[in-house]
Amino acid sequence: MYAAVYKQDNTEAGKVLLPKEIFGQAMKASFLHQVINAQAANRRQGNAHTKNRSEVRGGGKKPWRQKGTGRARAGSLRSPLFRGGGTVFGPRHGKDWKQKINQKVKKQALFLALSSKVREGTFFLVEDLKLKENKTKFAAGFVKNVASQAKTKDLGQGKTLVVLASPDENVFRSFRNLKGFAVDEVRNLSALQVISCRNILMAKEAVAVLKKTFLSSEKTALKEEVTAYSQEISVNFTQLQQHYTLNISAANVSGKLRSLALSGRLVGEGNAKVYLQKDSTRLLVFDTA
């Protein structure tokens, strides 16, 4: 999947290949909806607070005698029945709205959100997202140039998220006064943040940072390292019942391949890839089902 790259001087800088794992995901609306709701709930502070009848000031004196008035009996003017009294079952401070979101789920939701922006045509890549000075007129001119190159009137309409590869004070200060614009680093992106914006304006360098940040899988990295100097053998699970699978950790990825810990037996049937480590009899087993 290719995307056009735009420059500040009103010229197109060619095209760049976008990672399919990030920008080519098929939409899963229900999955994305669940993650966005959870992320929105995690932003709630829970500051709303009401007082019950024991916390409201006053009400210590019995308003009228128990009998003989013809009125209903009452013991305090701070009863929830009276104006100015306590609140029953109202919101209380300290309520925790947080929902647990697994890292893999959060990452997948971000990929779905970015993929949807690419399909909708509201994702724009720029060659050099830098400004000479921290002035709003430079930021406004920059957006105008990109919009004219992309032949769209949507850029600048609604909320636009400017995504940087690294912190840039000039860009942050310049876009701060533009209505509807928000600036953030690519490493801080979330599905809620992307979906909440109509347009995404991303620096070209941010794509590489995005790939490095969110596609660094220990299992994938270990596979690539082992495959470089090993021979691949296709076997069946039923032939490997006596062997053990491997406990893959981040320590096995950095530097040279280290000895791997054994962590349990293979279960079930199906195809597997077994890598025979060079100059060793150790088997590296990966499930490919």
Image (cartoon, helix red, strand yellow):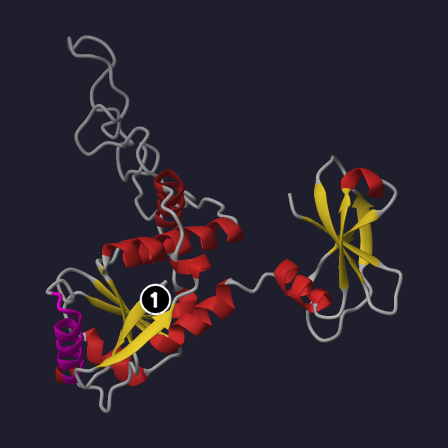
Residue drawn at (47%, 55%) of the image: 107
Residue 19: in magenta span = no
Residue at mark 1: 2
Quadrant assignment for the C terminus: top right
Q: Secondary structure at mark 1?
A: strand
Query: Eyeballing the image, is 238 above or below 116?
Result: above
Residue 177, located in which quarter of the rendered image? bottom left
Residue 175 locus on image (x, y percent): 21, 76
- Which residue of the protein is positioned furthest toward the bottom in this rendering? 132
**Magenta range:** 138-152
Q: 71 left or right of 193? A: left
Residue 234 locus on image (x, y percent): 75, 50
Residue 216 locus on image (x, y percent): 56, 65
Main secondary structure along the magenta-highlighted residues: helix
Mark 1 packing: few (<14 Cα in 10 Å), some, or many (20+)? few
Residue 142, located in which quarter of the rendered image? bottom left
Q: 210 left or right of 115? A: right
- Mark 1: amino acid: Tyr
Residue drawn at (46%, 58%) of the image: 21
Q: How many numbered marks are there? A: 1
Query: Eyeballing the image, is 52 above or below 257?
Result: above
Q: 58 left or right of 146? A: right
The residue nearer to you, when weighing 213 against 226, is: 226
- Is residue 243 visible to the viewer in this orientation of the structure? yes
Residue drawn at (76%, 70%) of the image: 257
Q: 100 left or right of 184? A: right
- Is residue 185 visible to the viewer in this orientation of the structure? no
Residue drawn at (72%, 47%) of the image: 272
Quadrant assignment for the N terminus: bottom left
